[in-house]
Image (cartoon, rainbow, N blue to C red):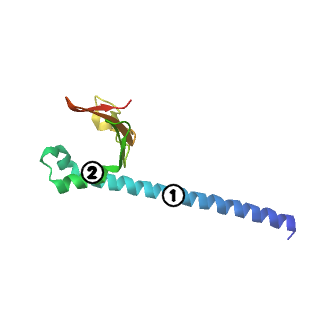
């Protein structure tokens, strides 16, 4: 076999191998994403009744609920009496919504529009009225 033909065949096979590796990595990432979605759905199923009755929730149940949705909470002292609270959720649930494909025929299903995973609040403490929680725009 001619050396140039050998190089072309090798280059083509190397390119195919790289494409297959990329496809494999994309498939792994998709499987991981689906696993995360399944855990989220399982979590919602397990806590749905509790979510409806949060005021009656036991402390252990509240902890499990919060561990299921929260990724990180950061509290930062901005000034003497001002704090910033940043909450990052595990899933994009802040401002998420669903939209019916046909509002008159809900059996046609709906589309879920993701929100974001983060929200920030600013908390100013005063001597007169305790805490004023204001959403940071």
Which residue corresponds to the image point at 37% horizontal and 36% vertical from the top-left?
79
Q: Nearer the viewer, residue 74 or 44?
A: 74
- Dot 1 falls on a residue whose secondary structure is helix
Crowd band around label 2 with a 10 angstrom C-alpha radius: few (<14), some (14–19), many (20+)? few
- Asked whether the residues under the numbered discs 2 and 1 touch, taking CB atoms below 8 Å apart as contact, a structural biologist would say no
Can residue 111 be seen from the camera position used here? no
Q: Which mark is residue 27?
A: 1
Q: Position of residue 17 (x, y in %)?
A: 66, 63
Q: Which mark is residue 119?
A: none
Q: Nearer the viewer, residue 58 or 134?
A: 134
- Cα separation between marks 2 and 1: 30 Å
Q: Position of residue 7 (x, y in %)?
A: 81, 65
Q: Position of residue 67 (x, y in %)?
A: 29, 54
Can residue 121 be seen from the camera position used here? yes
Quadrant assignment, res 77: top left
- Dot 2 falls on a residue whose secondary structure is helix
Give the label, 2 or 1, closer to the camera: 2
Q: Nearer the viewer, residue 17 or 113?
A: 113
Q: Label 2 belongs to which residue?
A: 66
Q: Position of residue 93 (x, y in %)?
A: 34, 42
Residue extending furthest toward the left: 56
């Amino acid at each position: 076999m001619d050396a140039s033909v050998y190089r072309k065949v090798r280059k083509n096979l190397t390119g195919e191998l790289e494409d297959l590796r990329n496809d494999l990595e994309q498939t792994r990432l998709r499987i991981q994403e689906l696993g995360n979605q399944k855990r989220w759905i399982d979590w919602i199923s397990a806590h749905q009744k509790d979510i409806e009755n949060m005021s009656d929730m036991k402390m252990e149940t509240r902890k499990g609920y919060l561990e299921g949705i929260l990724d990180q909470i950061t509290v930062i002292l901005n000034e003497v009496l001002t704090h910033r609270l940043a909450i990052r959720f595990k899933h994009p649930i802040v401002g998420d919504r669903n939209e019916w494909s046909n509002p008159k025929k809900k059996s046609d299903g709906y589309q879920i529009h993701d929100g974001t995973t983060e929200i920030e609040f600013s908390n100013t403490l005063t001597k007169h009225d305790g805490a004023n929680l204001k959403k940071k725009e």
